[in-house]
Image: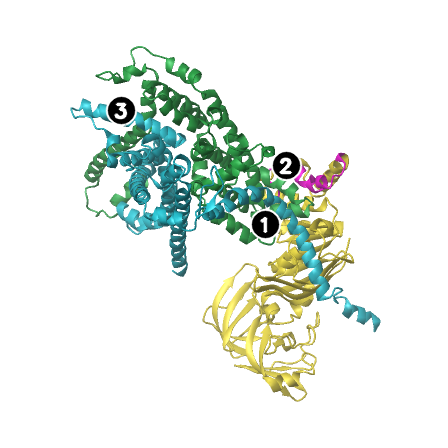
Chain colours: A cyan, B yellow, C green
């Protein structure tokens, strides 16, 4: 009997559920603690220089002063001030116009160049390298370089105009032209990046799909419209998202090329923030505008993630 | 050297219970195969023993020591992974030496141990190669060498052969059997391949949906499957199942199915619960292995049927026959004259038959006696 | 040259009695014209991309007053090297270069250490709060520096003296730039692609989490480290807003801020400004040409992070 009893009893548990739970959580804690050591070095600066400043920024928007002296609470006054500030609304409008123009232009050109590079592979490496070079230049330097293109007296553009028999144009005297110059400078700088991005996207379209379409009798243009574009759509959407977010922060070229002028016609949102905070010491308005920028970026991000998400849901359902 | 006890192991992933109350005892030096379809929880058990997963409840005891809350390395088990998990940036030597280097053993001892392990697995020539320069079989042997160099109490192998091609798999299977015979280390081996399980395991634990279905020697499990799942999972082609009704008949039992009426003696079915089973619902399934069916010409008695397909596999011929209201697979002589659409009759010895109750459990008391040539009951039809 | 496959599809639907030879000839002519046009477009844009850099050389090699001569001189009669000398002697150019190097290198090295450690933990370790903390990191991906620049400035300028960080210090310049969420995200994604078995095998072999990181993971993610390294360095090399705000003395400026300040200092002295621009771009272009493959990957990593 006893042999059978031991036989039946080998799988009896030695720990009560309570003991098991306690030992288990102790064990997991001990093993998990190593992980915290791995993330701690990152999280200290992350919390100090990214998370805390976000909330600090929001708090500051209800204060005045603070950069050189200590801040004092003013409630919603900053927000009321910037709400009626035509320079701010103008800056946001300029930023939006700039972003739309720059993105449309750079995407169109980049997509065209990517298609050409994808089709004509011979020597494409040289072209890729050439297109990439402007990306190495800091935006500040791009601004300087564009001075040499757009200068009234000796700029390349005006030299070409005069040699063709036209008169010179004072580009920086005209708000629309000045903003366009910033658009062109940023497009020039970003073209290589977006070309390479679209090229990579094009090359990620599975060759089998195109072959299948070919077998099904689809011609070149049809294949592009019916296979390539739908396959590229998520990447295009994603590209648009990061391009909008990046371009909403345009500042360096404004600083070097126009300083927001003439008559604030090239003042952008970040330019406005910087000027109020560090040039005019109208910190309260700068704080509020900074939070506004944060809000705009967050809304744009949320919309785009929602778009990407609904697309994925749609695809999964299909 | 150690035995392994798994007691009432439960592991959940979110809401899914991957392992449900599995208990398993593996003797010192035993080779136990965990067999089941993918996702049945067999790998999870292995990983819980290794310490790569934490059990939600239940205890794991290795060599008399409760290891649930002990770091993987201190459990002193070695694992061989399906894709070998060799460190790609280290030579074969360094791969094998890695566990010893981590344990800070003296250099000459490491050297000796690595060479011994390499010797056992015939890797001496490859010690300075990188994993990327090795064939699949060689990588497999390096993974084994890295496992044995630590002299572990137990081996845990997670589908170690599934990445090899068919030929190499058979060869490595034999090598693994020899390696186990030579080292005698307790081994848990996970696979979904029934041939590996049948040829390598001292015992086979068959799993499905996180539940241990049956554990026993390969012969036990094959000859007396505990339930419909085990019966159909083991064997190729799988066991045939014919729906029927169970009745008691003059101190014996009888299963009626379409075109078939099988009398079974109390030697085959004699459990006292059987009366209740019949009282409950008499629906049963008649189980018959394809190799236990003989083909006869039409009109010879037996179950009438019609041949649908022929699948010659060289050594055997598989026939798909429409009979008894279902399709029945028959394994027969490759020289059989059967042709598609032939009318045939199916014959079998009633003592070979398994009867599965409504809940899928095998109602047979014992496995059919080995080597018994005398039919216990004559077929009646 | 069109790919053979591309040529095929134009004939795919052709009728059996079509004049193949004639069609092919006409087609070839059309195709050649198309590809010449395509190459012209590519060449045009390549020139637009590189042209301004070349054009920049011209004023840097001339006296500034020569810029205003008419008709314009594209190629200087006599090469004038004086602009470069003036950049070196009349500005803190050396110091700006050094500052940029120190700033970008330090940010890169610190970022690499922090991000690989955190990326490994998020990819391969299990701990309470992992999902929530990673979500927090991701949610900060898009936060613009401009939106938090005021608190950053206030924080750095008020740090106590013993920290050696503050306005016009290297630490003050470097510290707020070392917590890029993108790097953590990239490292986590990359480490997630390593076979899970490698880490588990090492764990069973007795390696501690740090040993696994140091001896298994790090050697295997070298490509990702190079990519993230170049990416981070480039980001700081072009960084303008933060250095502009946190450096006020000439000797602490970075190249971007320094060169931008030349505009005010040498109002019409375009020769000097162009010389400084040339001097700033030349080394980068050389480095780029040597490591071009990595540069392209690095800039793509910033975008194709999904």
Classify residue B140 as left or right of residue A254: right
Q: Is residue A273 visible?
A: yes
Check disc 2 and report its element: helix, strand or loop.
Answer: loop
Chain under numbered label 2: B
| Whole-percent x, y for residue A257 in the image | 32, 30
Check disc 3 and report its element: helix, strand or loop.
Answer: loop
Classify residue A314 as left or right of residue B106: left
Classify residue A308 as left or right of residue B222: left
Q: Which residue is mark 1?
A: B167
| Whole-percent x, y for residue A170 in the image | 23, 28
Figure quadrant of residue A186: top left
Query: Does the magenta run of residues contain B100?
Result: yes
Magenta stretch, residue numbers: B86-107
Which residue occupies 39% across, 51% down? A299
Q: Work out whether B94 lies above or below B289.
A: above
- Given residues A96 and A202, the one toward you in this image is A96
- Category of crowding for the residue at label 1, using alpha-carbon neighbours closer than 10 angstroms: few (below 14), some (14–19), many (at least 20): few
The quarter of the rendered structure image containing the C terminus of chain A is bottom left
Q: Which residue is mark 3?
A: A155
Q: Which residue is mark 2?
A: B91
Query: Does the magenta run of residues contain A103?
Result: no
| Whole-percent x, y for residue C300 in the image | 43, 39
Front tag of 1 and 2: 2
**In this rendering, do the residues under marks 3 and 2 share a single chain?**
no
Figure quadrant of residue B365: bottom right
């Amino acid at each position: 009997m006893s042999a059978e009893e031991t036989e039946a009893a080998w799988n009896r548990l030695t720990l009560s559920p309570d003991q098991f739970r306690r030992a288990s959580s102790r064990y997991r804690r001990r093993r998990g603690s190593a992980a915290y050591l791995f993330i701690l070095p990152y999280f200290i600066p992350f919390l100090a220089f990214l998370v805390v400043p976000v909330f600090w920024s929001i708090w500051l928007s209800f204060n005045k002063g603070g950069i050189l002296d200590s801040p004092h609470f003013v409630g919603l006054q900053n927000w009321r001030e910037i709400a009626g500030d035509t320079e701010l609304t103008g800056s946001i409008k300029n930023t939006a116009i700039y972003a739309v123009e720059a993105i449309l232009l750079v995407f169109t050109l980049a997509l065209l160049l990517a298609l050409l590079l994808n089709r004509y592979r011979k020597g494409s490496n040289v072209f890729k390298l050439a297109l990439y070079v402007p990306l190495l230049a800091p935006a500040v330097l791009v601004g300087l370089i564009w001075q040499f293109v757009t200068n009234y007296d000796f700029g390349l553009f005006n030299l070409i105009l005069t040699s063709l028999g036209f008169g010179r144009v004072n580009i920086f005297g005209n708000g629309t032209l000045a903003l366009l110059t910033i658009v062109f400078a940023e497009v020039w700088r970003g073209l290589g990046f977006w070309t390479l991005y679209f090229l990579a996207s094009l090359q990620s379209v599975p060759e089998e799909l195109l072959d299948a379409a070919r077998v099904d009798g689809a011609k070149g243009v049809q294949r592009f419209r019916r296979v390539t574009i739908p396959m590229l759509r998520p990447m295009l959407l994603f590209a648009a998202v990061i391009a909008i977010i990046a371009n909403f922060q345009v500042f360096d070229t404004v600083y070097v090329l126009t300083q927001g002028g003439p008559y604030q016609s090239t003042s952008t949102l970040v330019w406005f923030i910087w000027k109020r905070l560090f040039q005019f010491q109208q910190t309260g308005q700068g704080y509020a505008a900074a939070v506004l920028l944060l809000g705009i970026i967050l809304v744009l991000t949320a919309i785009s993630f929602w778009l990407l998400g609904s697309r994925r849901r749609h695809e999964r359902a299909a | 050297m150690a035995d392994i006890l798994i007691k009432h192991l439960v592991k959940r992933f979110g809401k899914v219970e991957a392992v449900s109350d599995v208990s398993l005892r593996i003797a010192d030096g035993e080779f136990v195969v965990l067999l089941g379809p993918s996702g049945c929880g067999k790998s999870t058990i292995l990983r819980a023993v290794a310490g790569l997963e934490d059990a939600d409840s239940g205890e794991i005891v290795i060599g008399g020591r409760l290891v649930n809350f002990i770091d993987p390395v201190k459990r002193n088990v070695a694992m061989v992974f399906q894709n070998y998990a060799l460190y790609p940036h280290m030579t074969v030597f360094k791969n094998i030496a890695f566990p010893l280097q981590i344990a800070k053993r003296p250099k000459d001892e490491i050297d000796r141990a690595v060479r011994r392990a390499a010797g056992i697995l015939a890797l001496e020539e490859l010690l300075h190669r990188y994993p990327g320069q090795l064939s699949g079989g060689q990588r497999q042997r390096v993974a084994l060498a890295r496992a044995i160099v630590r002299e572990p109490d137990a081996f845990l192998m997670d589908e170690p052969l599934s990445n090899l091609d068919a030929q190499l798999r058979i060869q490595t299977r034999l090598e693994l059997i020899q390696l186990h015979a030579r080292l005698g280390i307790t081994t848990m081996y996970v696979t979904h391949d029934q041939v590996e399980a049948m040829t390598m395991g001292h015992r086979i634990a068959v799993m499905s949906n996180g539940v241990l279905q049956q554990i026993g020697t390969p012969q036990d499990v094959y000859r007396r499957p505990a339930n419909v799942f085990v019966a159909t999972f083991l064997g190729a082609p799988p066991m045939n199942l014919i729906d029927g009704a169970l009745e008691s008949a003059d101190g014996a039992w009888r299963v009626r199915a379409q075109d078939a009426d099988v009398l079974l003696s109390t030697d085959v079915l004699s459990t006292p619960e059987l009366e209740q089973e019949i009282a409950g619902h008499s629906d049963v399934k008649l189980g018959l292995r394809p190799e236990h069916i003989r083909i006869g010409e039409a009109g010879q008695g037996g179950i009438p049927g019609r041949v649908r397909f022929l699948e010659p596999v060289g050594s055997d011929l598989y026939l798909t026959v429409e009979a008894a209201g279902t399709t029945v697979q028959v394994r027969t002589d490759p020289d059989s004259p059967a042709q598609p659409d032939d009318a045939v009759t199916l014959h079998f010895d009633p003592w070979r038959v398994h009867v599965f109750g409504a809940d899928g459990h095998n109602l047979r008391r014992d496995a059919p006696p080995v080597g018994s040539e005398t039919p216990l009951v004559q077929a009646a039809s | 040259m069109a790919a053979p496959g591309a040529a095929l599809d134009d004939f795919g639907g052709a009728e059996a009695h079509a004049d193949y030879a004639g069609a092919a000839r006409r087609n070839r002519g059309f195709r050649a014209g198309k590809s010449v046009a395509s190459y012209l477009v590519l060449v045009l844009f390549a020139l637009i991309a590189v042209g301004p850099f070349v054009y920049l050389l011209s004023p840097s090699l001339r006296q500034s007053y020569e810029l205003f001569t008419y008709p314009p001189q594209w190629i200087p009669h006599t090469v004038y090297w004086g602009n470069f000398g003036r950049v070196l002697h009349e500005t803190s150019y050396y110091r700006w270069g050094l500052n940029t190097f120190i700033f970008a290198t330090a940010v890169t090295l610190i970022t690499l250490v922090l991000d690989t450690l955190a990326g490994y933990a998020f990819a391969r370790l299990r701990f309470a709060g992992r999902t929530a903390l990673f979500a927090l990191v991701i949610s900060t991906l898009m936060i613009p520096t401009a939106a938090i620049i005021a608190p950053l400035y206030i924080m750095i300028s008020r740090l106590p003296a013993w920290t050696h960080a503050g306005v016009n210090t290297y630490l003050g310049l470097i510290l707020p730039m070392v917590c890029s969420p993108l790097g953590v995200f990239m490292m986590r994604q990359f480490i997630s692609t390593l076979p899970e078995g490698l880490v588990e095998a090492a764990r069973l072999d007795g390696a501690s989490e740090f040993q696994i990181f140091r001896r298994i993971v790090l050697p295997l993610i070298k490509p990702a480290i190079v990519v993230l390294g170049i990416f981070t360095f480039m980001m700081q090399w072009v960084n303008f807003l933060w250095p502009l705000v946190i450096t006020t003395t000439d000797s602490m400026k970075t190249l971007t801020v320094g060169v931008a300040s030349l505009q005010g200092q040498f109002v019409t002295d375009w020769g000097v400004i162009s010389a400084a621009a040339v001097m700033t771009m030349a080394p980068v272009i050389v480095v780029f040409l040597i490591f071009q493959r990595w540069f392209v990957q690095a800039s793509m990593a910033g975008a194709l992070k999904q």
